[in-house]
């Protein structure tokens, strides 16, 4: 299927991921519009395009951009594919914004972390909701109009995008979406969206809150033996809760969920497998990679912790499986948000 078609694509949220993916689709010749509430960012994109640096080299891409208050112009250009890339707590209003501008047959793609498909479907309907995981893209919008990618692209060695229908079938629109995303980096259609979703949530919650609480970059979180032990503990807790909910969890950081459970119990062979997988992952990472939680805390913004570690803890409480480590990480991030703590490795000493 030829991905270079006349479909109109809108990204609601033009930060690190939305800006990166949207601009690279535009670079490939697709009709893309970026929409964001960061006014200086949109102004800079309008003037000079989006500037990229880091593991992808340095270059700029011109792309159409709109302020939130300019989104009403979409009345004259209905959206075929709306990709939501906002912070998790902004999902509802972002979906509501674009709903009124969807073309007949148009649909919404959730290109975010955690599990938000139910929020989107509650607004546009399950039939107009498609999920997409962007795995290990690791980018940061560090200044207006500027995005740095801090991990090597996945390419043939690692699949970045995993898109799927709610019902698990491979549809023509899903095939078309995957063909588009392959213009940006490696992509595949999945019949197991929910297993991919929870697997990505496990991977995120192993490091994002820990990075925020300690102030360490993601590479150091995985390199430090004690901190890595904490990440394994978080992963095992999240996997138990996901399996109890019935998810067929996809591999997490290249390893089957069962390996992480055994590693969490101290199994030596499982710990060796984890060590090997992490060494492979470290090869794609740079020292500039910080979690979104760390980035938000640095910028004085609200974090997504309630939708990450907090979400895992809440789901565990619902089904009677405790997640004390996730609860504690969530509480520590909130203390930092309130100014009661400063990020430091000592914050997690009691959890190691």
Image (cartoon, rainbow, N blue to C red):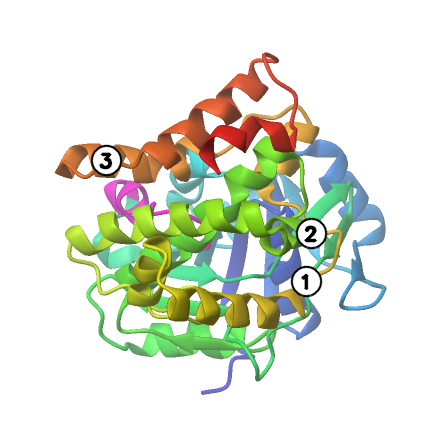
Q: Quadrant location of residue 30?
A: bottom right
In front of the other: 142 or 90: 142
Q: Is residue 320 left or right of residue 330?
A: left
**Cα distance, mark 3 to mark 1?**
32 Å
Q: Position of residue 286 (x, y in %)?
A: 73, 59
Assign a secondary structure to mark 3.
Answer: loop
Q: Residues within 10 Å of mark 2 (few under 14, many from 20)?
A: many
Q: Which disc number belongs to residue 322?
A: 3
Q: Residues within 10 Å of mark 1 (few under 14, many from 20)?
A: some
In front of the other: 76 or 295: 295
**Cα distance, mark 2 to mark 3?**
30 Å
Q: Is residue 176 magenta?
A: no
Q: Which residue is mark 1?
A: 285
In front of the other: 347 or 212: 347
Assign a secondary structure to mark 1.
Answer: loop
Residue at figure coordinates x 39%, y 67% from the top left: 270
Q: Is residue 176 left or right of residue 146?
A: left
Q: Which disc number belongs to residue 289?
A: 2
**Cα distance, mark 1 to mark 2?**
7 Å
Asked if the residues shown at circle 3 and circle 1 are in contact, with their CB atoms under 8 angstroms apart, the answer is no
Residue 105 visible in the snapshot: no
Q: Which residues are magenta?
A: 111-123
Residue at figure coordinates x 40%, y 66% from the top left: 268
Assign a secondary structure to mark 2.
Answer: loop
Q: Residues within 10 Å of mark 3 (few under 14, many from 20)?
A: some
Residue at figure coordinates x 71%, y 45% from the top left: 141
Q: Position of residue 345 (x, y in %)?
A: 63, 33
Residue 54 visible in the snapshot: yes
Asked if the residues shown at circle 1 and circle 2 are in contact, with their CB atoms under 8 angstroms apart, the answer is yes
Q: Quadrant location of residue 94?
A: top left
């Amino acid at each position: 299927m030829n991905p270079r078609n006349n479909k109109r694509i809108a990204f609601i949220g033009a930060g690190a991921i939305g800006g990166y993916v949207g601009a690279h689709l535009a670079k490939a010749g697709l009709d893309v519009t970026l929409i964001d509430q960061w006014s200086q960012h949109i102004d800079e994109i309008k003037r000079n395009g989006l500037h990229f640096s880091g593991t992808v080299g340095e270059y700029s891409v011109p792309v159409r951009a709109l302020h939130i208050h300019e989104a009403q112009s979409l009345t004259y250009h209905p959206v075929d594919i709306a990709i939501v890339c906002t912070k998790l707590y902004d999902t509802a209003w972002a979906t509501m914004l674009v709903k009124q501008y969807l073309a007949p047959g148009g649909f919404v793609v959730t290109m975010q972390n955690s599990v938000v498909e139910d929020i989107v479907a509650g607004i546009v309907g399950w039939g107009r909701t498609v999920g997409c995981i962007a795995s290990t893209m690791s980018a940061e919008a560090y200044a207006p109009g500027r995005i740095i990618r801090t991990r090597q692209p996945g390419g043939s060695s690692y699949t970045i995008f995993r898109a799927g229908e709610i019902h698990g079938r491979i549809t023509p629109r899903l095939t078309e979406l995957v063909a588009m995303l392959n213009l940006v980096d490696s992509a595949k259609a999945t019949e197991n969206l929910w297993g991919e979703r929870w697997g990505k949530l496990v991977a995120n919650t192993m490091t994002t809150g820990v990075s925020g609480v300690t102030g360490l970059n993601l590479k150091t979180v995985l390199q430090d033996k004690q901190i890595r032990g904490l990440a394994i503990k978080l992963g095992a807790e999240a996997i138990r809760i996901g399996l109890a909910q019935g998810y067929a969890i996809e591999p997490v950081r290249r390893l089957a969920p069962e390996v992480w459970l055994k590693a969490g119990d101290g199994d030596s062979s499982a710990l060796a497998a984890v060590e090997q997988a992490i060494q492979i992952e470290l090869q794609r990472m740079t020292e500039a990679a910080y979690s979104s939680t760390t980035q938000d805390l640095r910028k004085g913004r609200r974090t997504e912790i309630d939708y990450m570690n907090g979400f895992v803890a809440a789901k565990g409480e619902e089904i009677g499986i405790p997640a004390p480590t996730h609860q504690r990480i969530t509480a520590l991030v909130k203390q930092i948000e309130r100014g009661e703590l400063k990020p430091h490795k000592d914050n997690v000493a009691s959890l190691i």
